[in-house]
Amino acid sequence: MFTETLLTWIARFISGASVRWFESQPDTCQRVYFANHTSHLDAILVWSSLPNDVRRLTRPVAAKDYWVGGAVRRKLAKVFNALLIDRTEIKVHQSPVDLMLREIGRTHSLIIFPEGGRGEGDETGEFKSGLYYLAKKRPDLELIPVYINNMNRILPRGEFLPVPLLSSVTFGPPLWLESGEPKNDFLARARDAVLRLKDC
Amino acid sequence: MLESWALLGTVAALLGLATASGQWLRRSDSPLLDRRAIDSFNARLQAWWFFSFVVAVAFVAPGLAVTLFGLISFWALREFVTLTPTRSGDHRALFWVFFLFTPMQFVLVYLDKFESIQTYGLFSMLIPVYAFLFIAARSAFAGDFDRFLERIAKVQCALMICVYCLSFAPALLFLDPNPPGGPSDNALLLGFFVTVVLASDLLQWFWSKSLGQNVIAPAIDPTKTWEGVAAGAGSTAVVGALLFWATPYAHWYHAAMMALLIAAMAAAGSLTMAAIRRDRGELASGNFVEGHGGVLSRIDSLCFAAPVFYHVTRFILPDLTGN
């Protein structure tokens, strides 16, 4: 509890994030927050931007290979209740999407980064299909687009010391998978929903 | 001692009055009122309360006041660099700018307190010379030459305005007083400086609103007029003369002249910062900084006036008074 509060404050200080909810409101209903990915701190940042009661029910999805490397990272991943996914070894009957759905049950929400890896600089890459399968298997989940601005300057790829600039996190209005919507159309629409928040 | 209480009391009374009227204006729903102007007025008053608090701290704990100025610098620097596009090649240089040069500048300013160390030479040189050389070299070692000169100039400019120039305000606390007096005299000098800068900000803004005709640079700041600046500077000089008793100067007109000088520098500062913000586009500040443009737009006039006020008080006024 104490570490959680401390971590939230540190994350807020380093990222200097102003948090905005654009045409949407924080809620404890089951949601999938999907954001653009620019820095290692993204997961902590989105997680710490949520109000306390929502945050307790929300689990960021993170790459296992990064977050088990070193005692500090392992401890951090535990504090913010991360759901670690093994990127290197994906089994047929144990797909990441099934794992995520099993872990969240009927109470928790997820934070995911559908680009997979971090983008190069400012660019937001194409979305991987995980978001589509999540939406298809659990159509009741609200999908909330999140735009993270400027984090790539605070902690760029390959750096380990952050520069305390200011960033912003914008949560957008929920979207759902339309019935019969093709996978690529849906992923493009979801990506646009994130990018549209840039100018809000 | 009496003067310190008098200064704090005067400022608190004036601010209380202004805040009350600002809040009253905010609540009243007359359609004739300009909402934006009232919000801007209230934001300025908030900044003024904050700086008066810092001055009050300076009377009892100069070290803490220096720390507070350091934190303001740090925050302003965050805003400034956020507005300025840098590349990942500048990351390491920026790290040292934030975590080495900024704290070090304020530590050196504080060390000037001790007669035996005399760090004036060091803190007036650290950023213009050593940070300048370091930033250029560190970015070069990072190996990215794209718009190199532009990038290092931006970082250096941020450091000069937000850290170096502002640090001359707390440096006033350790300036050799003239005529000699206790340490509280210097807090009075800082109080005089801060009050005059913020008063000039408010007066120039007020006169520009009420009798402005000729805009100085419409593309940069459509609200700043020659009339506003002139009338603002004139009325600031009156404020300065009225606060003469709080200064170490020999004559009342020295205080008035200093106030005039401060007003001119403050106008230059806010216009310069408006140009920088315009260059980066409105969205840049609006997106990251909530409220009225953040810390940076509240301290721009302080930054420009501080070094000039410090140097004139230190080097020119003693000569004028024949000491």
Image (spheres, coloured by chain):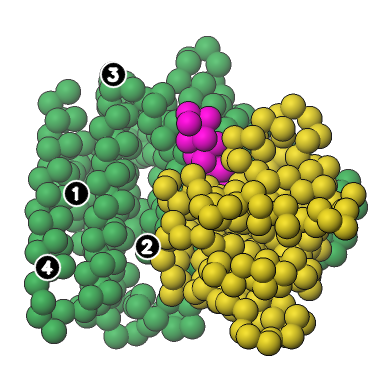
Chain colours: A yellow, B green
**Local crowd size for mark 2, using a 10 Å CA cut-off: few (<14), some (14–19), many (≥20):** few
- The relative height of residue B122 versus residue A168 in the rendered view (above or below) is above
Residue occupying the point 10% across, 45% down: B13
* Horizontal relation, residue B160 to residue A136: left or right: left
Between tags 2 and 3, which lies in front? 2
**Rendered image: mark on residue B241:** 1
Q: Is residue A31 visible?
A: yes
Residue occupying the point 69% across, 86% down: A181
Q: Earlier in the sequence, mark 2 or mark 1?
A: 1
| Total number of numbered discs in the rendering | 4
Q: Is residue B164 visible?
A: no
Magenta span dominant secondary structure: helix
**Residue beneath disc 3:** B182
Q: Secondary structure at mark 2?
A: loop
**Residue beneath disc 2:** B291
| Stretch of the chain drawn in magenta | A1-15
Q: Amino acid at mark 1?
A: Ala
Instruction: Give the Cα separation between the discs numbered 3 and 1.
Output: 23 Å
Percent across and percent down for residue A125 are 78, 70
The C terminus of chain B, quarter of image: top left
Q: Secondary structure at mark 4?
A: helix
Q: Earlier in the sequence, mark 3 or mark 4?
A: 4
**Residue beneath disc 4:** B27
